[in-house]
Amino acid sequence: MANHIPGQAATHSRSRFCSSSIPLFPPLSPRRLATMPKPQRRRRHPLSPDQLPCGKRKRQRAHDRCAVNGTPLPDDALAGIFARLPGGADVVRCAAACARWRRVVATRAAALSRSLPPPGRFLRHLAVGVFHQEGDGPTARTRSAAAVSSPQPRFLPVASGSRLVGLHHSCIGTLFHGAGLSGGFFDCSRPVASRNGRLVLELQRQSHGDGVTFCVCNPMTGDAQVLPPLSGKDKPEDYGCALLTGDDLLPRRGAKSFRLLLIYNPRGFTALRCYSSDTGRWGAEARSAVEVSTWELRRIGPAVVRRGVAFWPLDHGALGVRPAAADDPEQAAMDAHLLPYDVHHRWPEKRLLGVSPDDRLFFIYFGIRGGDYILMAKISYFDIDGDDIRTGRKENSSFEEAVLMHQMKMTSQDGTLKLRWFGEKRGLVLFTMGGSGGHSGTFALNLREGTVEKLADGEGHSWRNFVGFEMDWATYLASLAHAEEN
């Protein structure tokens, strides 16, 4: 047996694969060559737009502009996508993405606002400000032809409203400049109600015997509609006024639809009457199932609206009135019911009604916390079974919520405190103080944040006709493009 030499064995083992009789890379058959992938050409590095020829350069820049705008979809397709977003806040974010999306939102604001669900929370950008008359202003009994020089209602913005409207302490006539209204159209008028971007004004009466004429206008767009006057036996003296817009009505109506609801005492009973923009006429007078004294009507507070029902705060409860559903003005039947308080509240200027983001009616008044004299708001809710206002009543006061205003430390009880108006879109409570408690001026309490903004220093206590103003969704969305331009 021959001696084993490791090196020689390894050489022999490799030689079997390197033999000249067996090629290392045998030739491929034609069938195998046909199935193999073709060799790829090496791609050139993309050129910058400046290195492209002139024609290709323009097409590349157009493609880049389309990419900046977010998508090459048509405007109508984009608007359809925006209309299906979960809420208005998402639409606002889309409008902030680029100039094209902002233009699409602004030009289709009316359609988008009707398709959006309720926001479900307070929104700070929709609050604009306050319309008021300095001093008590003329009343129905003191207006005369000699009072034509009386001041017009003036506008006082909140911080966000001053950026949108750009006016401060301006007469209402300046907001309608160029709208076809004469310079003295709003002389001696007084604001009586507002809702969803519309303001209701009672226009001037030349004498006590003249009828009552209302104007429903939009200060943001300059639109104004003068309603047929109520005169003779139909004329109300002291009244409560509520405005219901198309979004409030059931079923929902168009953006320009509205109802104006009045409650008054014509001849020894309490009457209800409603104007419909769809028919352009006042409905027939209806007798209310709830009697309201003339004393209460003279001091009735602002109304709030929930699910097509207008609510006013009274001494013993909240009066709810649902206008007739039919468009026929001869059908004047209305549903009226008093939702009782658990405790009577006989101070009209110390109480307000409001609607929470989760669609609950609530009662609010102010008090002072003992010990540190911090001003606070106390809130209690009404229990209502669905849309049946006959089942409603206020919860026990032991379940009240408190919102502390640490900025408002009082020196004493302030008898001049007046709760003026509640803005349900932002959750603002507007109130005025005369100074006996250490603070004087016009203030806005943000219920969500618990902060107080001073709108006017030392002014407001003597303002009698005081109405807050908030934009509707359509006007706000349309204003986004103008805000960007400015």
Image: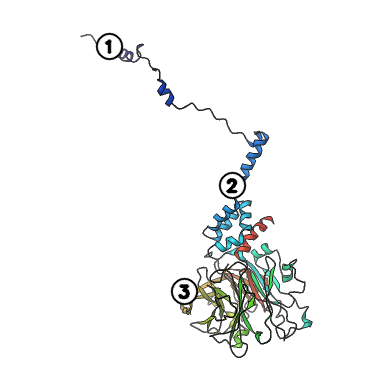
- Tell me the kind of residue under disc 2: Pro
Image location of residue 379, percent across then percent down: 52, 75
Residue linked to disc 2? 72
Nearest-to-viewer mark from 1 and 2: 2
Where's residue 99, x and y in %? 63, 51
State the CA–CA distance, disc 1 to disc 2: 78 Å
Q: Indicate the secondary structure of the residue bearing disc 1.
A: loop
Label 3, residues with CA under 10 Å away: few <14, some 14-19, many ≥20 = few
Instruction: Give the farthest residue toward the bottom.
Output: 268
Q: Nearer the viewer, residue 354 or 228?
A: 228
First in sequence, mark 1 or 3: give its number: 1
Distance from disc 3 to disc 2, alpha carbons, whole Å, reads: 45 Å
Residue 14 x, y percent position in the rendering: 33, 15
- Looking at the image, can residue 366 be seen? no
Q: Which residue is mark 1?
A: 5
Residue 361 coordinates in the image, percent (x, y): 51, 74
* Amino acid identity at mark 3: Gly
Which amino acid does the dot numbered 1 rest on? Ile
